């Protein structure tokens, strides 16, 4: 039940966490496992029939993907997330949070809404199942010509605790050469480096970013995506490269 509830939050987050309810009455999402960790958690991607896209780090990733694909329908009228109150304001985002109840199970949910309007971070904790962090946004259209600068919210936490530190990031995306450079940080951490962009799908990735958290240094992997008709916004998740990653986080921003 708890994993199913976490999955339900994930499904709602793909569709509703950005831009509200769908205009279609029959929306489905398909999920794929991008990475499985040694503790059974991992990274998954979800894409709806209307093009909204998200990446998540969550427990029991392979079981989640199998269950979600067996029951792919999403309720477009679910407004639990939309009704969460604003609890704080960040330089590039507004933060909403509170408790939602799905199938009789309560979950603590935080949504970081980028002020650019097309991307968000989602954090949820379900007792008995664990927590997830997701990055989601509107459908991607096509890549613009040239190099563009993105700014937004960057968050990271130690996976063994509930503590998360929030900061900002700057990213330069060169769509002509299909490369990007990312620099994100908080008071006690930094994540820097570059990778490649798939301009057809609007996705980008790197498995060799430099991560520093306090005195702990490592490499990190990022799974990102652009949102909007001409890639106006961006979001993604990342984790350090241990078999059971020590740190994980996400980002959402716009140009």
Image: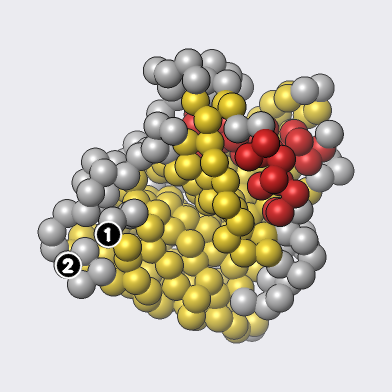
Which residue is outermost to the left?
145
Mark 1 is surrounded, within 10 Å at the Cα level, by few (under 14), some (14 to 19) or many (20 or more) other residues, namely many
Q: Secondary structure at mark 1?
A: loop
Residue 78 position in % (x across, y down):
58, 19
Q: Residue at x 57, y 61 (%)?
A: 34
Mark 2, Cα crowd under 10 Å, few <14 / some 14-19 / many 20+, is: few
For mark 2, give the secondary structure. Answer: loop
Q: Residue at x 73, y 59 (%)?
A: 41
Residue under the image location 37 percent in, 74 percent down: 195
Q: Position of residue 103 (x, y in %)?
A: 77, 23
Instruction: For residue 84, say whether it is visible.
Output: no
**Residue for badge 1:** 199
Which mark is drawn over residue 176? 2
Query: Could you tell me how far apart the alpha carbons at marks 1 and 2 are, in whole angstroms?
Result: 9 Å
Residue 151 picture location, percent across and down? 33, 56
Left or right relative to 195: residue 100:
right
Residue 229 location (% of width, % of height): 24, 41
Along the line of sight, the residue nearer the viewer: 252 or 102: 102
Residue 27 lies, with reference to residue 138, above or below; the image says above
Quadrant containing the N terminus is top right
């Amino acid at each position: 039940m708890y994993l199913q509830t976490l999955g339900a939050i994930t499904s709602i987050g793909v569709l509703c966490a950005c831009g509200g309810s769908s205009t279609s009455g029959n929306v489905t999402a398909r999920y794929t496992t991008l990475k499985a960790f040694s503790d059974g958690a991992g990274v998954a991607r979800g894409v709806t029939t209307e093009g909204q896209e998200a990446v998540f780090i969550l427990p029991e990733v392979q079981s989640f993907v199998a269950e979600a694909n067996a029951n792919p329908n999403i309720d477009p009228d679910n407004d639990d997330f939309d009704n969460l109150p604003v609890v704080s304001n960040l330089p590039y985002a507004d933060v909403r949070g509170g408790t939602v109840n799905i199938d009789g199970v309560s979950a603590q949910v935080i949504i970081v809404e980028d002020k650019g309007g097309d991307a968000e971070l989602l954090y949820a904790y379900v007792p008995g199942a664990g927590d997830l962090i997701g990055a989601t946004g509107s459908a991607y259209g096509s890549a613009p010509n040239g190099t563009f600068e993105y700014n937004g919210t960057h968050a990271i936490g130690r996976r063994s605790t509930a503590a998360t530190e929030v900061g900002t990031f700057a990213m330069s995306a060169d769509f002509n050469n299909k490369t990007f450079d990312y620099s994100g940080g908080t008071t006690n951490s930094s994540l820097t480096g570059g990778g490649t962009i798939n301009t057809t799908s609007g996705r980008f990735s790197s498995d060799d970013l430099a991560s520093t958290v306090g005195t702990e240094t490592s490499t990190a992997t990022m799974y990102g995506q652009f949102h909007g008709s001409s890639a106006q916004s961006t979001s993604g998740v990342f984790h350090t490269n241990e078999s059971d990653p020590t740190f994980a986080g996400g980002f959402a921003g716009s140009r």
